[in-house]
Image (cartoon, helix red, strand yellow):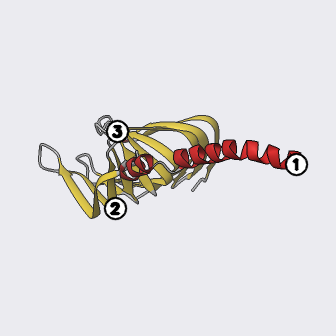
Amino acid sequence: MSANLRLALFFLPIALIVAALGYWNIHNPAEIESAAFAPPDNSIDFFAQGTHTLQFTDAGSLNYELNSPRIEHTQHDDITVLLQPELLLFRGTELPWKISSERSHVSPDGQEVELIKQVRIARTDEKGRPTLLTTEHLTYVPETDYAHTKLAVKIEAANGVTTGIGMQTYLNESKMQLLSNVRGRHEVR
């Protein structure tokens, strides 16, 4: 018998055992079955389409009106995702703040709302002058009407345009504070 044949016969059983163990580990039916029935971490436990929500104050006036083509709730983190939300925030006044974005995430307790992509906050004051604030990400705290971002902000008002990086605002007081790199163009009329 040649040396090559003896060497092949010696290693052939070892190679077959390694191949069989590898095949068994890769294709273990119990693992495949349990993986097939395990829910993903971001599974949606409920959703709603074409939503329209109204909330009133204790005095009976309109507090806000919310529209969203789709709302999803994820089970594992208790986050509610609103797609293309449009919020009219009255807070007891006749002139609402109009808030919209591509999507938003509402925290489990509703304490914070993350507005994500193409965030727009618009309002027209008593004299008919429009104000438009735009950014890519904004965190809103409904209880205090406080909103903030660390990203670039652009504010277009009747008398000019102001830009900056980072912002803090109290919507109920109509105060906006830009945090850095503030630039403005003021038009005199």
Residue drawn at 59 percent across, 45 percent down = 22
Is residue 127 something one can see in this rendering?
A: no
- Of discs 3 and 1, which sits in the foreground? 1
Q: Secondary structure at mark 1?
A: loop
CA distance for labels 3 and 1:
88 Å
Callout 3: few (<14), some (14-19), or many (20+) C-alpha neighbours within 10 Å? some
Of callouts 2 and 1, the N-terminal one: 1
Residue drawn at 62 percent across, 43 percent down = 17
Amino acid residing under circle 1 = Ser
Residue 149 image offset from top left, x and y in percent? 51, 39
Residue 128 image offset from top left, x and y in percent? 39, 59
Judging by the rendered image, the residue that carries numbered circle 2 is 70
Q: Is residue 25 left or right of residue 68?
A: right
Q: Secondary structure at mark 2?
A: strand
CA distance for labels 2 and 1:
74 Å
Mark sitting on residue 123: none
Of callouts 2 and 3, the N-terminal one: 2
Instruction: Please tell me which residue lies in front, 180 or 83.
Output: 83
Amino acid residing under circle 3 = Asp
Mark sitting on residue 2: 1
Judging by the rendered image, the residue that carries numbered circle 3 is 145
Is residue 15 something one can see in this rendering?
A: yes
- Quarter of the figure with residue 78: top left
Residue 43 image offset from top left, x and y in percent? 36, 50
- Of discs 2 and 3, which sits in the foreground? 2
Residue farthest along the front direction in this orientation:
1
